[in-house]
Amino acid sequence: MAPQKDYYRVLGVAEAATADEIKKAYRRLAKKHHPDANPGDKSAGERFKEISEAHAVLSDPDKRKQYDRMRRLGAFAGAARGPRPGGGAPRSGRGGAGGVPPAEEFDIGGGAFGGLGDLFSSIFGDRREESARAEAVETVLAIPFRVAALGGKVPVAVPVTEPCDTCKGTGAAPGSQLSTCEECRGSGQVAFGYGGFAVKRPCPACRGKGKIATQRCGTCQGGGEVRVERRLMIDVPPGSDAGTTLRLKGQGARGRDGKVGDLLVTFQVEPDRFFTRDGLDVLCQVPVNVVQATLGTRIKVRTLDGKHVVLKIPPGTQPGRTFRIKGQGIEKNGERGDQMVEVTVEVPSKLTPEQEAKLKAFADAAGLRH
């Protein structure tokens, strides 16, 4: 039987997907299903958790190897039959569905399968400890084209989940008592049977805390956490590309242990009405009329820094001809590109009778009407 939760299917990638493909798939799905983008949709929140869990495993080379090993051994097989009370695993007879042996025949602590219990522990860890630790927060920030090219400061508002200041993360109203959770007996975890293995997950009753308040905190409604918005000014390095990720130490979410995680900001570059980019070069188009293209002229061209340079257009310039302005491109790592200017020729859409007569006379004299 196939695993109940296939992380490759969760992210929509192949089993042989590269680390970059996994990262791109995660960012795309996380942005789509983030709770902030789907207010009031509980299913989106669950989907977001599932996506984050899949990324946490598949993005870590060691955890991914262990996960792949368990998939091959069918460690998740039988999960679709659901958990058993008390954390026991559903059992099948020898040669049953999926060929999964009875639970008692697995050496969970070691033996022939190399300690699959330890593999589960190393991949999924102690979720109570993980929830208490600070986490990195990822966000996508749209920045103007010129800011990406030249660098600069841009504001960003990042929603983060932090321990509630009112109850200090306990979920209990000030002055109320905390009692041991009867569901998990204070452990903060419940066990689910997965094909002969007891996999521990956070207790849904106490949310992994092991304690339940007699009166819930009015600020966080007993959750122990609140959603806040952190506003920052981001320094965008010159020459930043779309997809560039900036790590800001200590600007992420604050865990119940008091430590603050990092903030990962991925840039999304907005298009510019005048400029496009090719590596370190910037490209633009400037129009000239028929007379200017035929007889030659001088035109002013705006550069990336907002200044203007004079560009000489020689006589007989054809539409589509490109001119290079040295050193007016993007500077990065000690190198600087150029500005490539493509000339477009504008043809009058309407002439006066007098203009039309003169143009026909010119065409006849130059032999252009034959």
Image (cartoon, rainbow, N blue to C red):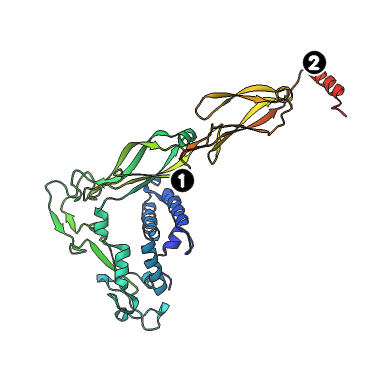
Q: Is residue 327 above or below residue 350?
A: below
Query: Which residue in the structure is indicated by mark 2?
Result: 354
Residue 39 seen from this side: no
Residue at 69 percent across and 28 percent down: it is 345
Placement of the N terminus among the 4 image quadrants: bottom left
Disc 2: CA contacts within 10 A as few (<14), some (14-19) or many (>=20): few
Which quadrant would the C terminus be assigned to in this image? Answer: top right
Which residue corresponds to the image point at 82% horizontal and 18% vertical from the top-left?
357
Residue 204 horizontal side relative to residue 363, left or right:
left
Determine the image quadrant of residue 193.
bottom left
In the rendered structure, find residue 243 and report the number of the disc placed on it: 1
Q: Is residue 152 visible?
A: yes
Residue 324 pos. (x, y %): 61, 32
Instruction: First in sequence, mark 2 or 1: give its number.
Output: 1
Amino acid residing under circle 1: Gly
**Badge 2 amino acid:** Glu
Instruction: Pick the residue in front: 137 or 283.
Output: 283
Q: Is residue 258 above or below residue 332?
A: below
